[in-house]
Image: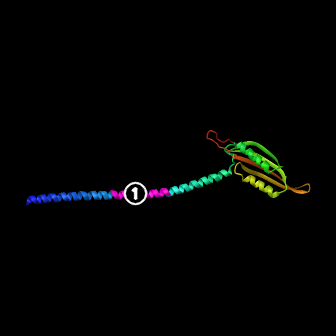
Amino acid sequence: MSVDLDTDLRLTQKRYFIAVVILLLLTVSAIVLHKYDAGCLATVKDLQTAKKNLRLMRDTSTSITATLRNLQTLFPPDRARLSAEQLLFGKIDEIKLRFRGADMTIGNIETQSSYLAISFALKGVVQNYPLFLDAVGEMERTVLPVVQIKTLNISQEEVNHTASISYQVDGLLKFPVAVTAEQPPPQQ
């Protein structure tokens, strides 16, 4: 009987050992699966955040593109092809057309900090004061080149028994130019 008891005890020990090994394997597997599950949930959450951010970035990109298109409408269409001097002289031509019959004097092109500038003076007579004010306002509204009106003198006169308004406008046309590190802005 003792042999049978030893054999039974060894068999029982082997069964317990196998059961403990299986239990340990199951426990380790459960821990690994739990960590894997937590990692998968974190990945899903990160992907959802990325998807949400992608939509926001797409919307922002669309907004930036629309803003750039709007900005491009403010600049002269020939901006890419023409130099700053050509754009300044083009604006002078526009002012001459807008104020037909006026005497216009222009100064030399000067470099002022990061701008090219041309001074101008207009002198003339108009009969329609509201149209004159619209023309002055339109001249100041342009984005590039910048029109800075320094003085505006208006007086009423009578020419050939007709009430007229005499005016003199002194201003400055400015256009920004790129300043590179090799070429600092000139000192005034």
Residue 34 located left or right of residue 126: left
Q: Residue at x 85, y 52 (%)?
A: 125
Magenta stretch containing residue 95, yes or no? no
Q: Quadrant of the C terminus?
A: top right
Report the residue that reaches farthest toward the right.
161
Residue 168 located left or right of residue 62: right
Q: Residue at x 65, y 52 (%)?
A: 71
Residue 117 position (above or below residue 11): above
Foreground: 18 or 156?
Answer: 18
Q: In the rendered image, which residue does mark 1 sit on?
A: 40
State how the image is colored: rainbow
Q: Position of residue 88 (x, y in %)?
A: 73, 45
- Within the image, what quadrant is residue 111 found in? top right
Q: Residue at x 80, y 49 (%)?
A: 122
Q: Position of residue 124 (x, y in %)?
A: 84, 51
Residue 126 located left or right of residue 76: right
Extent of the magenta region? 32-51
Foreground: 67 or 140?
Answer: 67
Q: How many neighbours does mark 1 have within 10 angstroms: few (below 14), some (14-19), or many (20 or more)?
A: few
Magenta stretch containing residue 45, yes or no? yes
**The residue under label 1 is which amino acid type?**
Cys
Q: Residue at x 81, y 47 (%)?
A: 104
Q: Position of residue 172 (x, y in %)?
A: 74, 48
Q: Position of residue 167 (x, y in %)?
A: 83, 53
Report the residue that reaches farthest toward the left.
1
Could you tell me if residue 111 is visible in this image? Answer: no
